[in-house]
Image: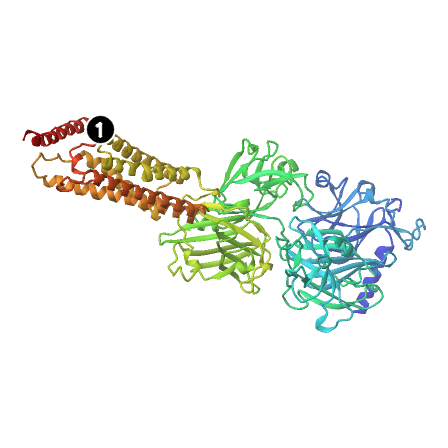
Amino acid sequence: MLRESTISLFLFFFLCCHADPECTRVSPLVDLEFDFKMVQHQLRGRIKVLDDCSFRVSQFDMLSGSDVHWWGALAPDLDNLTNGFVISDHRLNQTFANSTFVVRLLNNVTWSMIQVLAVWDRPTGSDFGHIVLEELANVTEASPAPAPAGGDGKGKGEVRIHTEPTMFENCKVLSDNFRLRWSLNVGEDSIEIGLEAATGIMNYMAFGWANPNNTGSELMVGADVAVAGFKEDGLPFVDDFFITKYSECVTDSNGSSEGVCPDSIYVGPDRVGLVNNTELIFGQRKDGVTFVRYRRPLSKVDGKYDHPVDPLANMTVIWAMGKIRPPDTLQHHYLPQNHGGLPSQNFGHLVLNVSEHVNDCHGPLDAEDKEDQDVIIADGKVPLVVSTGPALHYPNPPNPERVLYINKKESPVLRVERGVPVTFSIQAGHDVAFYVTSDPIGGNATVRNLTETIYAGGPEAHGVVASPKELVWAPNRNTPDKLYYHSLFEPKMGWRVEVVDGGLSDMYNNSVLLDDQQVTFFWTLSKDSSIFIAARGEKKSGYLAIGFGSGMVNTYAYVGWIDDNGLGRVDTYWIDGKDAKSIHHTHENLTYVRCRTENGIITLEFTRPLDPSCDRSIRPECSNIIDPTTPLKVVWAMGARWSNENLSNMNMHSVTSSRAINVLLMRGSAEAEQDLLPVLAVHGFMMFLAWGMLLPGGILAARYLKHLKGDGWYKIHVYLQYSGLVIVLLALLFAVAELRGFYVTSPHVKFGIAAIFFACIQPVNACLRPPKPNNGEHPSLKRVIWEYFHIIVGRTAFVLGLAALFSGMKHLEERYGEENANGLILAMVVWFVLGAFIVFYLEYRERQRVRGRIFGRSNWVLGNAEEDDSLDLLSPSRAHAEKESQTSATMEVQLEPLNR
C-alpha cells in the first residue's frame, strides 16, 4: 500500500513539474491559477497553466453528465459558448471527487484561441462551469510560490490566483448533506464561512459558536449562530441569531421574545444594523444544493448577543438544518423551526479550531431532488398561457436574456398526461414560434446539422396577447417520457416536458385554477350524493389547505401534509377566527383520503357526502353542506409546516389566496367572488315587487274597492294580477339565465316553482269559470267546485310566494355571504305585518259598510263576495252588463216600500 502511494505521488509530481518538452512557456497565462465559476453539476476546482499546451486541474469536483468535454469559446454568452470547440480529448463523463490531473490541449489548439475555458455538456448545451481567461489574466491578487521546475525563473516567487466565492481554504463535513467551509483572515479580524447543504429550498442552515460557559445538553442555550437560506423570491439571506431557549422564536403580548430569535428582535428594530454581525457575500441554489457565503468578525462583536472567536483555540460549535417559516402577518423574520430528526443528521456539535487546515470534503454534494424549477401540471380543460419574460433563474445556462414563461412561471417543468389533450394559448410574440421537440436545445436542430422530432407546433405557432394562437397537443402512448418545449427561431428559451401516464385530469370530470393560479381544484359529482375532491399546489410547500368559505374566518378547511414519518395526512378543521386558537379540529366523514408530495408539490384527495348525516347542534362540521346548484366558495393557503396537534401561530400560512373563487359545480367552471350578482339582485327585487306588492294589491282591490263607481275596481284587480304574474315569470327567466341552469334542489327554488305553478293556474281557472245562477236559483255543482278550487289555489299560491321570498333571503345569507340579509328579512317581516294591519282595518270598514245586510252563502274567492260573483274577470263588457242588471234589481227592492 505504501509503495502504491509512493508511485502515485511520484507520477503526480512528474506530471505537474515537468512540462512537455515540445511545449514552450511563452503564454502570459503560464503559472497563473484560476478558480472555476460554478454554473451547474456542483463543479468546483482550480486550474494552473503549466505551459503552452497543458494545464493542471486540482480540487476538482463535478457530478457526472452525458457527454462532457473541455471546451473553448470567445465569450461566456450563449452564442459563443454554443459555437465553441473541444480543446482536449480528455473527457469528463464521470463524477469527480477532489481530483487532481493534467489536461493536454489538442495539437491544433493554443491558449491564444481560448478566451473562455469551460466544462461543456454537448447533448444538452450545458455549461457546467467556466473561467474567463482574458479578463482574469491581469488579476492582482498574489501569493508566493516557487518557480516551476525546469523554468527560466521568470516570474519566480509569484503565482497570481483568481478565486471564486465557492472556493475556500478549509472544508469540514458536518453530516452526509451538510458541509462547513471557511477561510480565515486574522489580519482583518474576520472569517468567511460557507454553509452548503443538499436540502429543500424552503429549509435553513444554521451554524455558530456555543456559549463557552455551557456544556453538555445546554450547548444550544446562549449560542451565537447564523441562520442562512433562501427567501421566497429566490434571493439568499443570512441573519444573526441568539438562542435563549430550546424552542422556536415566540414573542408574547408584552413584546418580549425567547427561543431561537434574531438579535434584532431582542433589541428592537432601531438597532438592527448594530447587532447583525453577519455580512452576506454570495449565495446560490444549484442542483438541489443551497450554498451561502458570509463574513463575520472574530473579536469585534456585540458582547451581549455574539461570542468572540479565538482563531487559535479549540471552541465548540453547533449546527442544524430544517424547515424555515417565512414572514407572515404576525412575524416579519424568516424563523427556523424545530429541526427534528436524529443527531448527526439534522443537528449536532463539535470542537473546531479555525486556524487548523481541514479538508475532508471528498466529492460534490449529490442531492436527491435536483429540480428547483416550478412544475406546471397540464389540465386538459385549462389552456396554458405561453409568454416571454426575463431570464432570472433559467435551469440550463447559458441562455438568452428572454425565455419562455408558462402561466407566468419562468421556464417551468411541464408535466402532461398521455391521452389528455393540452391546449396552449401562445402569446409570446410573432418572433417566437412555439414547438414541442425531442431536441434539448431547440432553435431548429437542422441549423446545427442535427435531427429532431417535432411533436407539436412549428413555424405557424406564434401569436400575441391581442390575437393569441391556440395550439392543441394530445400526447399518446407512443410519446416519449421526456421532451422539450422551445422556440423554433432561437435556442434554449424553454425547458423540459415530462410525459406521464394519466392522473388527476383523467380521474376527475372537472377542474379549475383557484385564485392567483397557485392551486388547481378538481371534483366529480357522484350519483350517490357525494363529491370526489382533489387539490394540487402549483408551487413547493410544506402543506396545502383548501377551505369552503369566503375567507379565513368561518371556513371549513381541509389540510394535506406529510408527517414526520413520511405518511400523507388530510385533516379537517372549522376556523372561526384569525389565530391558532380559532382552528378547531373536526371529524368529517372523509373516505378515499390520499395525500402525496412530488418535488415538494402537495396533492390531496378525498371523498365526502354532499349533506353530512349527523347532528348539526353538536358537531359544527355537520353544517358543511355542499349544494351543487349554488356556487361553492373555495379559498386556499400554503405554508412551511403543519401538525395535527398543538397548533400554534407557527402553523400560520406563508401564502394564501387573495379572494375566494366561486366554483360552479354543475357547470364545471369558476368565477371570481363578487358581491351579490346584479342579475340575482334584480331577480329578488322583482319577486318582492310581485309577491309583496302587486299580487296582494290585486286581491285587496277585488275585496275592498267594490263601492267604487263603474268597473274601476275590476281594472285595478286585473292589471295588478297580470302585471304581478308577468314580473314573476321575467324574474324567473333572469335567475335561470344567470345561473345557466334550472336546478330544483334548494327550499327556495322549490317554494318558488310551486308558487309560480299555482299562480299560473288562476288565469286558466278564470277562463273555465261556470256561469252564475239566476236570482233565486241554487248554484250548480260545477259552480261550487270551481269556487272552492279558486279559493284553495289562490290562497296556496300567495302563501307559497311568501315562503319563497323568505327562503330566498335565507338562501342569500347562507350561500352568498350577504351581510345585510338579516336586516332585509326583518324589513320584509315589518312590511308584511304592516300589510296585515291594513287588511284588518279594511276588513273592519267593509263589515261596517255592509252591516245590516243579510248574507246568504259566502262565495268569497280571493277576496270577492257574492255581490261581484257574476263578474267575468276576463271580459269587462260582460262584467259591466251584469253589474247593471244587478243594480236595477236592487233598485226594485228598494222602491217597494215607497209604493206601500
- Quadrant in the rendering for residue 405: top right
Coordinates of residue 407 in the picture (x, y in percent): 56, 42
Q: Which amino acid does label 1 sit on?
A: Lys
Q: Mark 1 points at which residue?
A: 709
Q: Residue at x 61, y 52 (%)?
A: 329
> Of all residues shown, which one is farthest toward the right?
153
- Quadrant in the rendering for residue 776: top left
- Quadrant in the rendering for residue 600: bottom right
Q: Residue at x 76, y 68 (%)?
A: 211
- Camera-side residue: 99 or 136? 136
- Camera-side residue: 325 or 747? 747
> Of all residues shown, which one is farthest toward the bottom?
216
**SS label for mark 1:** loop
- Camera-side residue: 735 or 512? 735
- Residue 310 position (above or below residue 452): below
- Residue 250 position (above or below residue 80): below
Coordinates of residue 228 in the picture (x, y in percent): 71, 56
